[in-house]
Amino acid sequence: MIANAYYSHEMHEDFVLVSIGRLDLEEGGVLPDCRLAVRTWGRMNDAKDNVVLIPTWYSGTHQIWADAYVGPGHALDPERYFIVCVNQIGNGLSTSPHNTEDSSISMSRFPRVRIGDDVVAQERLMREHFGVERLALVVGGSMGAQQTYEWAVRFPKKVLRAAPIAGTAKNTPHDFLFTETLNEQIWSDPGWNGGEYASNTDVLDGLTRHAHLWGTMGFSTEFWKQQRWSDLGFSTQEAFLVDFLEPYFTAMDPNDLLTMAWKWQRGDVSRHTDGDLAAALGRITATTYVMPISEDMFFPVRDCAAEQALVPGSELRVIDDVSGHLGLFAVNAGFIPQVDRHLSDLLAVPRT
Amino acid sequence: MIANAYYSHEMHEDFVLVSIGRLDLEEGGVLPDCRLAVRTWGRMNDAKDNVVLIPTWYSGTHQIWADAYVGPGHALDPERYFIVCVNQIGNGLSTSPHNTEDSSISMSRFPRVRIGDDVVAQERLMREHFGVERLALVVGGSMGAQQTYEWAVRFPKKVLRAAPIAGTAKNTPHDFLFTETLNEQIWSDPGWNGGEYASNTDVLDGLTRHAHLWGTMGFSTEFWKQQRWSDLGFSTQEAFLVDFLEPYFTAMDPNDLLTMAWKWQRGDVSRHTDGDLAAALGRITATTYVMPISEDMFFPVRDCAAEQALVPGSELRVIDDVSGHLGLFAVNAGFIPQVDRHLSDLLAVPRT
């Protein structure tokens, strides 16, 4: 366990750690005491039919959902819904390489975790901790979309509505390679030391290069051309890099990022159906809106649309945003209103 | 000067080194004896009106033009045209950091070179060495497109036809950042040693990561999804990476790549017009076909189309290729026939 101020209550509001006990992992490892960092908003009604689950994305936590997506006036309105955001395993708030006190799994010894492990852990949390058997909605972006698909395929009776945003049910070859280039920035930093560094600051160079790769693949060519960083109050491209992208990623823990990346690279609901993606997505009974971002460089609309076509009764709802994938950060003022509109429509679809 | 077998006559057919003498550079440096590696095909006619000039792209040499673009049956037919491919300064064949015997400019001491310097050098070569004042066509891909635009803007009376393929007249902010991530792979390798390595193999790790970035930005998401590497005879994605992309880039010289990258990042014909791109492109009198590649991830069609709209009398001729930018390697069998068709049309336009 090493100290990292980023993963603190000061930086992340109002979450609680909930132990779900021992978690046996798909790849054979074990988390002896799996703790999930959970942020909730609103109250569960007596019928328990107003529960929304949000899994998190790579590098993300519940905080971005608190800052941009959840609140009065949004589709995800705590006045109407009991909203549960569960930080994914390895994200630095839930059980992760850098924060576990269990030396058998800390740092470089952290076991391999899959998207399916997260969803199994979340299902246990919802059932045992919250007493919830059915979800009005599962919604997540990027790796959160991977978990959303996994939920809808693995537990079809438990998911009434699903909204995978800017992500895929089966990771693409290009995304595997892109993620590997992110990993390589960390691995190639001598300070990483095979995962046995004393502080994330030892890996500053690698994390900085990692941030730069997000600059060119996470944001679109048009984002940079139109200088849309000015929407966020930055005066130059360089300032946006140095004062936004670099601090964001260099604050994080390298092993935590690598743990999430390994999961991301192998996300694939067709593991349930011997590789038959159509069969896996055909299991989904949730009312599903597939919501890619128009300018996403690595989850392009066509990849999401091809999967959407395999989900019975689903709709393709493209979010028009010039920012690209990291439009998920709500960079553009037009982004959240579109998300709200689509999620409001989806939540209005009658389901029992 | 260090040895590197890649930049040899064994690997590169039929080129000659032509000294154009001292070259004073835009940034203030000097190449005391600038030598250009030149490959020619065909013969100049008496009217000297059948001359085609080809500048090269980042990492490229004349060899890819010999292998894929020039020959009987192609638009660039040596039976009809006198075709001159000039390797850009710093590409490892022309005067470059690794191959100069002049210790005042070798390795880390190599001066900064701009696209304009290349074009000035090429104009001098054509005029003084070949006695050519006007070019029937300038055609190049990527950085070759940058040089093509520079030719057409700087020497409008000398260029009758221009075909910039998969490149821009003014480099985009995104491209600057992408290129910087390529550079960072080299700079971050301890073996690079500030540019004072003993062999390119000292920088194997950095060059390998550099190759991987080309994998995700140079080829398109769809290239990987459709497994188009199989068109080149590879049986797996991994084999394509390890047996094609990695050997291609790791054979090269790191300082040479950095020299080209610095140029690429700053390519901008509006340097001639105080930053007014419309004014610069408005100078062009060449009949110009702007030829982006449909799936290019970093020279997207819209960026090329926006420039094309500023070139008087020009046409946009999109090359439909799923490969992305590195479709330039003629990966897809459908690529070269499209290039040939467009160049044949262009060469058929009467000009005097």
Image (cartoon, coloured by chain):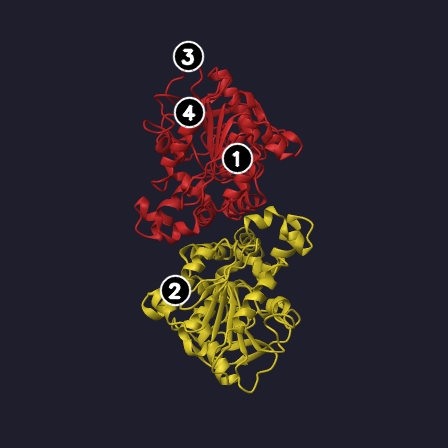
Chain colours: A red, B yellow
Mark toward the viewer: 1 or 2: 2
Query: Disc 3 designates what residue?
Result: A46
Cα distance between the residues tagged 3 and 4? 19 Å
The amino acid type found where label 1 is placed reads Met
Binning the other alpha carbons within 10 Å of mark 3 as few (below 14), some (14 to 19) or many (20 upward) gives few
Q: Nearer the viewer, residue B38 or B180?
A: B38
On screen, residue A99 versus residue B328, left or right, reads left
Please say if the residues under marks 3 and 4 sit with CB atoms less than 8 Å apart: no
Q: Which chain's residue wears label 2?
A: B
Query: Disc 2 designates what residue?
Result: B310
Q: Is residue B141 above or below residue A292?
A: below
Residue B322 in view: yes
Query: Disc 1 designates what residue?
Result: A107
The amino acid type found where label 2 is placed reads Leu
- Which residue: 61% across, 63% down? B337
Name the element at disc 4: helix
Q: Which chain's residue wears label 3?
A: A
Mark toward the viewer: 1 or 4: 4
Mark toward the viewer: 3 or 4: 4
Q: Tell me the tag on residue A348.
A: 4
Percent x, y of residue A196: 52, 39
The amino acid type found where label 4 is placed reads Ala
Closer to the chain start, of discs 3 and 4, is 3
Closer to the chain start, of discs 1 and 4, is 1
Mark toward the viewer: 3 or 2: 2
Toward which corner of the image does residue B80 lie, by quadrant? bottom right
Cα distance between the residues tagged 3 and 2? 65 Å
The amino acid type found where label 3 is placed reads Asp
